[in-house]
Image: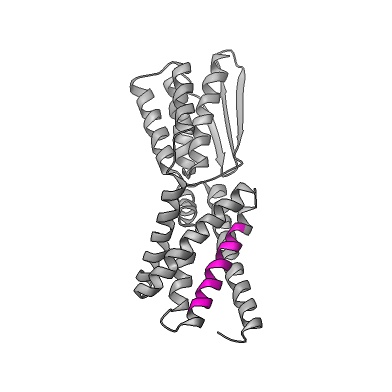
Amino acid sequence: MITDNIVNLAAEAGKIMLENGGETYRVEQTINMICKSYGIDNAESFVSPTAIITSTMDENGRNSTIIKRITSRATDLEKVALINNLSRQIQSHPLTLDELRKELKYIRSFPKYSNSIKTFFAGVTTGTFTLLFGGSFSDFIIAFGVGILINLLSSMLSRLSVNEFFINVAGGALAAIIGLFFSYINPIFHKDEIIIGSIMLLVPGLVITNAIRDTIAGDLLSGLSRTLEAIMIAGAIAIGAAFSFKIWMSIIGGM
């Protein structure tokens, strides 16, 4: 029974990491480190982007297997770092299982940045990328507003449980239509720079990075899964932008 609790808590720690942007090898390493800290040396873990399977065998030959389903994924590297530090702390100063459970509960509920801060910096991100791609200060202002609108739209659709694919389609469409509109009403605005800078907010940078790292580390299933996920996100953004271009050409008749 104690073994079951240890394996369950170790898998829960891995789940928190995986849900918040942790790499496959790091999740497996963390699970094994926690189990080993409590005297379980034969723990085996299989981690994919959608599931964690952890199994061990006690001295009586009884298997203990825990499956954790990953149903949501976000990017919160602070939680990944906290779990990472916790697993190393346990190695030198072991906690009781109740203390470990409380620590995991605290990390899972660790406060994120407020919506207002995330919305503001979404605008800063898109505006800065627009400048990076050669846009003017006027383009920066428009892209700043687009970033805020994309963030608000994504948050609203997430609360409505809309699929992530369609959220990215909507974001790409919004970025394109606003860029086209402002470049149409005034030539000082450059649609290319505004659109490219704005959709950078949606580009799956962490997913691509983890896909490469997982593949290099030999986690081929996770690497391929994350690569496909990145391609799907990029495709959704492109579909949204193309939809706006098509609508614009149908109504206005040109760019």
Q: Is residue 96 above or below residue 68?
A: above
Whether residue 123 is visible to the viewer of this picture, yes or no, is yes
Question: Looking at the rendering, in which quadrant would you find the N terminus?
Answer: top right
Residue in view at x 41 percent, y 49 percent? 117
Is 179 magenta? The answer is yes
Q: Is residue 105 above or below residue 135?
A: above
Q: Residue at x 62, y 17 (%)?
A: 62
Which of the two residues, 40 or 144, is positioned nearer the viewer here? 144
Q: Is residue 201 visible?
A: no
Using the image, determine if residue 126 lies above or below residue 89.
below
Placement of 36 over or under 189, stated as above or below: above
Q: Relative to 173, is 26 on the left or the right?
A: left
Q: Residue at x 38, y 69 (%)?
A: 140
Residue 29 at x, y percent in the picture: 45, 35
250 left or right of 28? right
Q: How is the image coloured?
A: one colour
Asked if residue 238 is among those painted magenta in the image, a careful observer would answer: no
Q: Residue furthest front?
A: 185
- Report whether 247 appears left or right of 212: right
Question: In the rendered view, does 246 fall on the left or right side of 20?
Answer: right
Task: Name the image quarter holding the C terminus.
Answer: bottom right
What residue is shown at x 61% (from left), y 84% (from top)? 252
For the magenta stretch, what is the residue range? Answer: 167-182
- Percent across and percent down for residue 209 are 45, 54
Front residue of 35/189: it is 189
- Image coords of residue 223 (percent x, y): 53, 51
Q: Hey, which residue is sitting farthest bottom in the picture?
A: 253
Q: Position of residue 92 (x, y in %)?
A: 33, 22
Judging depth in this view, the residue of 197 and 152 nearest the camera is 152
Is 95 in front, or is 127? 127
